[in-house]
């Protein structure tokens, strides 16, 4: 089966620059949206985790029962993983006292285990093969671990290591540029580079989200979480429908 046929059957979007732009916006939204529920609304991390767990399960079920790729459904599920990842990581660190370093280590093991099991079961962890319930299940489990790991990793670097949000954003952004260069200039597996970039977009979004809504005394801009979340949703919808419109024009 050639790559064009695989992509046509796949229930995930083609990996383009627009994909990465929306992914970073979605991970930033995950931070502001998760904090809005758990902190601004005062519901706490445990209740926030329970709420977003339900949203995540419902979104995955809808996504898996869809017969073909639907961009809004797909990105809604991605956002569900980022918001849930935010509250899980915060609950583990601040309520259970595991710490971001300990949480990052545990989640890294879980993520590697998920990728290993996926590879051994289906023979490939390439995203264009995600077209069956089995591969979708592995895909969303892996993403859930990666989003939670990314949240813990971002907070570890920015808060625990004391580098701050702006410096951390530069670090993670620089690592993503390095991966992009490796994609075009080296023969490193594109699948490995994809998952590396996918994981790193989450801590980038986490520190950018924190930079937007944290108090100025902590190095943030102290902007409204609700307003930031609303703006991010509008931007994501703009890119989804603009890209969809352009793709439709090119196919005619």
Image (spheres, helix red, strand yellow):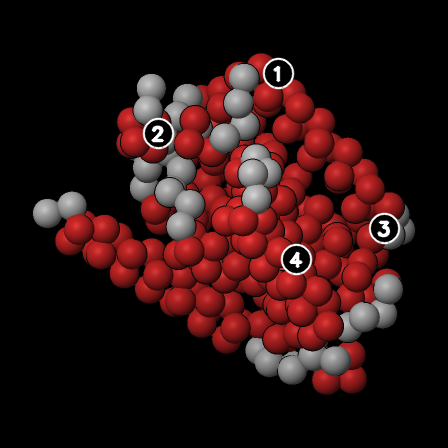
Check disc 3: other Cα within 10 Å, few if <14, some if 14-19, many if 20+. Answer: some
Is 40 or 122 nearer to us in this picture?
122
Which quarter of the image is occupied by the N terminus? top left
> How far apart are the alpha carbons under marks 1 and 3?
29 Å
Q: Provide the secondary structure element on which disc 3 rests.
A: helix
Query: Residue 163 location, x and y as percent?
Result: 81, 70
Q: Which residue is mark 3?
A: 101
Label 1 vs 3, first from the N-terminus: 3
- Residue farthest to the top? 121
Within-10-Å neighbours for mark 2: few <14, some 14–19, many 20+: few
Seen in the picture, residue 135 relative to 206 is either above or below; the reply is above
Disc on the earlier residue, 4 or 1? 1
- Reply above or below: 171 against 184: below
Q: Secondary structure at mark 1?
A: helix
Which one is earlier in the sequence, the residue at label 3 or at label 4? 3
Q: Which residue is mark 1?
A: 120
Choose between 42 and 230: the one closer to the eye: 230
Any mark on residue 175, and which? Answer: 4
Distance of label 1 from label 2 (alpha carbons): 21 Å
The reply to whether residue 235 is visible in this rendering is yes
Earlier in the chain: of badge 2 and badge 4, it is 2
Q: Disc 2, disc 4: CB below 8 Å?
A: no
Q: Is residue 251 left or right of residue 162?
A: left
- Gap between marks 2 and 4 measured at Cα: 28 Å
Residue at image point 38% right, 67% down: 234
Residue 82 visible within the image: no
Pointer 2: what residue? 3
Residue at position x 72%, y 84% from top? 216
Foreground mark, 3 or 4? 4
Spatial distance from mark 2 to mark 3, Cα to Cα?
Answer: 39 Å
Q: Residue 95 location, x and y as percent? A: 83, 53
Disc 1: CA contacts within 10 A as few (<14), some (14-19) or many (>=20): few
């Amino acid at each position: 089966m050639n790559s064009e046929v695989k992509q046509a059957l796949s229930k995930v979007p083609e990996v383009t620059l627009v994909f990465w732009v929306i992914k970073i916006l979605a991970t930033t939204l995950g931070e502001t949206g998760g904090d809005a529920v758990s902190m601004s609304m005062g519901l706490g991390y445990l209740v926030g985790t329970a709420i977003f767990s339900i949203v995540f399960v419902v979104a995955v079920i809808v996504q898996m029962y869809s017969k073909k790729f639907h961009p809004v459904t797909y990105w809604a599920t991605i956002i569900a993983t980022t918001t849930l990842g935010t509250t899980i990581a915060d609950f583990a660190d601040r309520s259970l006292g595991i710490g971001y370093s300990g949480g990052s280590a545990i989640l890294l093991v879980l993520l590697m285990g998920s990728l290993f099991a996926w590879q051994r079961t289906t023979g490939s962890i390439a995203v264009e093969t995600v077209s069956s319930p089995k591969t979708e299940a592995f895909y969303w489990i892996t993403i859930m671990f990666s989003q939670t790991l990314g949240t813990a990793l971002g907070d570890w670097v920015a808060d625990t290591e004391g580098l701050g949000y702006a410096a951390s954003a530069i670090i993670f952004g620089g690592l993503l540029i390095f991966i992009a260069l490796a994609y075009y200039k080296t023969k490193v597996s594109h699948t490995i580079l994809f998952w590396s970039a996918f994981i790193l977009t989450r801590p980038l979004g986490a520190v950018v989200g924190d930079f937007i809504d944290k108090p100025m005394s902590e190095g943030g801009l102290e902007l409204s979480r609700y307003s930031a979340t609303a703006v991010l949703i509008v931007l994501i919808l703009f890119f989804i429908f603009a890209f969809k419109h352009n793709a439709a024009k090119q196919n005619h």
